[in-house]
Image: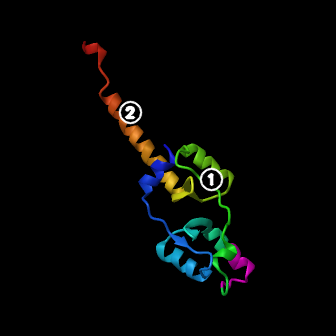
Amino acid sequence: MQVREIIRLKGGALYTATPQQSLAVAVDTMAELDVGSLVVMHGGRMVGMLTFREVMRALRTHASRLDGLTVGDVMVGDPVTAFPDMEANELRRLMIDKHSRYLPVLDGETLLGVISFLDVAKAVLEEQCFENKMLKSYIKNWPDESKG
């Protein structure tokens, strides 16, 4: 299974923020949408990622106050990215090695979406269930050589 298939299964919803946006507003957006990350866009290009990890660090660093902080103040400016032809196992290894729960997927300069570790787990589970059904069907319909 490739990353492009995971993006297809997940759907095309993409949630964004701008570097100038208030961090408090971004946190509200994340909570309202029940998402763990926002892609930070500026001038039509991805310039960073904001995840709940950066929010937690900002809260710790600023005594639990987000007043005056912007998304650009705390975002990851050069996030690890995936590409559409990447295999799911390679993607999982990258996410584990880089401690990244969310990875933007780029096709050249084009942002295709964001994949979470949960998205990967769901896609792999669906693939395994499909393969399991196919194997059971194959075994069930196995030709019985003793009847021939």
Packing grade of label 1 (10 A; few <14, some 14-19, many >=20) is: some
- In the image, is 119 to the left or to the right of 67? left
Specify the amino acid type for callout 1: Met
Seen as rendered, the residue at the extreme front is 43
Q: Secondary structure at mark 2?
A: helix
Report the Cα–Cα distance between label 2 and label 1.
Answer: 30 Å
Task: Give amino acid for label 2.
Answer: Leu
Residue at position x 44%, y 64% in the image: 13
Asked whether residue 115 appears in the rendered view, the answer is: no
Q: Is residue 126 left or right of residue 114?
A: left
**What residue is shown with label 2?**
135
Q: Nearer the viewer, residue 68 or 119?
A: 68
Indicate the colouring scheme: rainbow
Along the horizontal axis of the image, is 74 left or right of 37?
right
Give the magenta-colored segment's residue range. Answer: 56-66
Q: Is residue 59 magenta?
A: yes
